[in-house]
Image: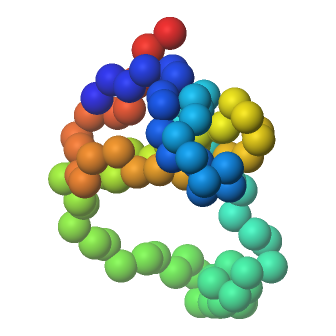
Amino acid sequence: MKIANEVNTFCPYCRKHTLHKVKNVSKGQQRGQSKATRRHNRAITGYVGSVEPKIHPKKLGKKQKVLLECAVCKKNVEKVYGKRTRKKLEIKR
């Protein structure tokens, strides 16, 4: 799925249509003190061994999320393009 590197779309902060710069959304780092991480670390200590997660069926495609930066107010807005696509989002240069 190809998308232009600049898109004219609605900005909720300016409350009008403005030009936006398109960037890929990268996943952030997982928190070390989250409840799931602490629960997992507690389960693997001692003589228990490793705790394997349940195997879930793979989804056919992911939702393609993109980060839009407004040219006027410089605020960022996330937007999802397409429902579920097998192809990665590609930004045209």
Which quadrant of the structure image shows residue 64? top left
Would residue 39 appear left or right of 17 to someone viewing this image? right
Figure disc tally:
0
**Which of the two residues, 57 or 18, is positioned nearer the viewer here?**
18
Residue 60, position in %: x, y? 19, 53
Query: Can I make out residue 10 in this image?
Result: yes
Residue 77, position in %: x, y? 60, 50
**Which residue is depicted at the point 58% across and 81% down?**
49
Would residue 1 appear left or right of 80 to someone viewing this image? left
**Which residue is depicted at the point 46% across and 76% down?**
52
Q: Which quadrant, please, contains the N terminus?
A: top left
Image height of 85 relative to 51, above or below: above
Residue 31, position in %: x, y? 75, 69
**Which of the two residues, 8 or 15, is positioned nearer the viewer here?**
15
Which quadrant of the structure image shows residue 33? bottom right
**Which residue is depicted at the point 60% across and 53% down?**
15
Would residue 15 appear left or right of 64 to someone viewing this image? right
The image's colour scheme reads rainbow
**Which residue is depicted at the point 43% across and 21% down?**
4
Most extreme residue toward the front, as rendered? 16
Which quadrant of the structure image shows residue 24? top right
Query: Can I make out residue 41 in this image?
Result: no
**Which of the two residues, 4 or 73, is positioned nearer the viewer here?**
73
Most extreme residue toward the top, as rendered? 93
Image height of 12 relative to 42, above or below: above
Residue 46, position in %: x, y? 71, 89
